[in-house]
Image (cartoon, helix red, strand yellow):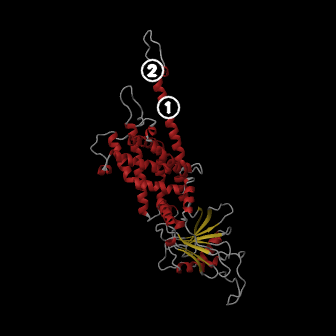
Amino acid sequence: MSPARSGFGQLLLRLHFYAGLLVAPFLLVAALTGIAYVFTPQIEKAVYADELTVSAPAGAQAIPLSQQLAAARAVHPTGDLIGVRPGRPETTTQVDFTSPDLDEEHQHTVYVNQYTGRVTGQMTIWWATTPLRTWFDDLHTNLQLGTVGYFYSEFAASWLWVIALGGVILWFRRQRGKRMLRPDLGAKKGVRRTRGWHASTGLWLSIGLLFLSATGLTWSNYAGVNFGNAVDALDGSRPEVSTTLTAAAAAPAAGGHHGGGAPTTGDTPVDPAAIDKVWPAATAAGIDGPVAITVPGDNATAWGVTEQDGRWPMRRDGVAVDGATGQITDTINYADWPFMAKLTQIGIYAHMGDLFGLANQIVLAALALGLICVIVWGYRMWWQRRPTRTGRRAIVGAPPVGPGAWQKLPAWAIVVGVPVILAVGYFLPLFGVPLAAFIAFDVLIATIRRRRRTASIPVSPAPAGVALTSPQEASAQGADQG
């Protein structure tokens, strides 16, 4: 093995060991809370059955949306109407209002049976998400600790890809070909067999783990901001329909049959009954499935109608509708989205378990369970490698490679690698800062060990009559004699 390869291998092995040891607890928590979160749609339907679901009578037709809004307003007379999610055959209509005691991220939602107009329940939601799903979301992303808790999930996502890639490379160095895909079942019980299960399972999971790491970082506190800036620079942001109405598009508020009345202005209150023009116009334009209707704040703004089907991201078309005339004023089709916007949207839906429904949930749960097994096997190897001989007993095993492994890298690798690591560390701060701490710790330990070895070297006494000469003096004497 060449020195360069030996240096790379030793450094990677030491980094994989410490990263796995220190990051694994965070990954374990993320995996457990992720399993709980991914099945919240099923839990929601059970917990909020009265609010979310409705039995459709045979042959029944939904009453006009304006009547459903009136029923919701009757039980919630305060606040502004800001959004409506029309009911589907077996789900209720959800009507969102502002409330003086809520911030912009929260709304008060009233649930209405679209067949009878009866209110089935009310609750405060966060970005159209029920309290139960919001609670599990917070548990997964910040452990219910608020801003401080977000460090845990970003730290885990920032290192997951490093651990996964490092493990694949290390396993490739040890095994080749088909042997990488399965554990060595013929190995005796011990660290070798455990390593086989740990490494081969990690290999099978690697693509999924890399995906979870990348998508998890997209909405993290620090790396997420950098990702958003990069997407904006690449013109990959998700487009939105324009809801601005021009003077020509503004409809008359009153007047004769030829539109001779006074034009609408931004100060004119929005008539909720206009939704009976907006919704049919949007459905005629091809907008269907789960839909969110945004109610404008004034009559100088169009209503927004957008598809919200997370199972099929290609169903994300949207239109803007003039509430006074029912005319479509702008259209955005998913097919016209930038590639980066499509990729980001699909990644988010897949990470949340929404893409393709139950199949996506099962895959995510399998990934999380596999990661838990890999973590357990990793700690088991650490325990199995402990010294057990008399006089050398230890609770756990020592690191597989001593400190200072990075110093064995060739000069070109350091020259090329340092700028790359700095760039990645800048883009992923919770990868860069811990890595810098690891290198500083490694250098410190290597320095301490080197000094201890130097201090422990015995000095033989000089024979009688022989003067002690320092290396510098001996060198000078040799030069003089030459």
Q: Residue at x 37, y 36 (%)?
A: 385
Vertical side of 200 occupied by 307: above or below: below
Taking depth in this image into account, of 354 and 328 the one nearest to the observer is: 328
**CA gap, disc 1 and disc 2:** 33 Å
Vertical side of 285 occupied by 415: above or below: above
Residue under pointer 2: 478
Q: Residue at x 42, y 56 (%)?
A: 208
Residue 306 is at least partly visible in this image:
yes
Furthest residue toward top: 465
Query: What label sits on residue 447 in the rendered view?
Result: 1
In the image, taking residue 193 as reference, residue 147 lies left or right, namely: right
Q: Looking at numbered disc 1 in the image, what kind of residue is underneath it?
A: Thr
Q: Residue at x 39, y 34 (%)?
A: 386
Is the N terminus in the top left, top right, bottom left or bottom right quadrant? top left
- Answer with the quarter of the image where residue 7 lies: top left
Query: What is the x, y in percent for residue 87?
Result: 53, 72
Furthest residue toward left: 186
Q: Looking at numbered disc 2 in the image, what kind of residue is underneath it?
A: Gly
Q: Secondary structure at mark 1?
A: helix
- Answer with the quarter of the image where residue 119 lies: bottom right
Query: What label sits on residue 465 in the rendered view?
Result: none
Count the marks: 2
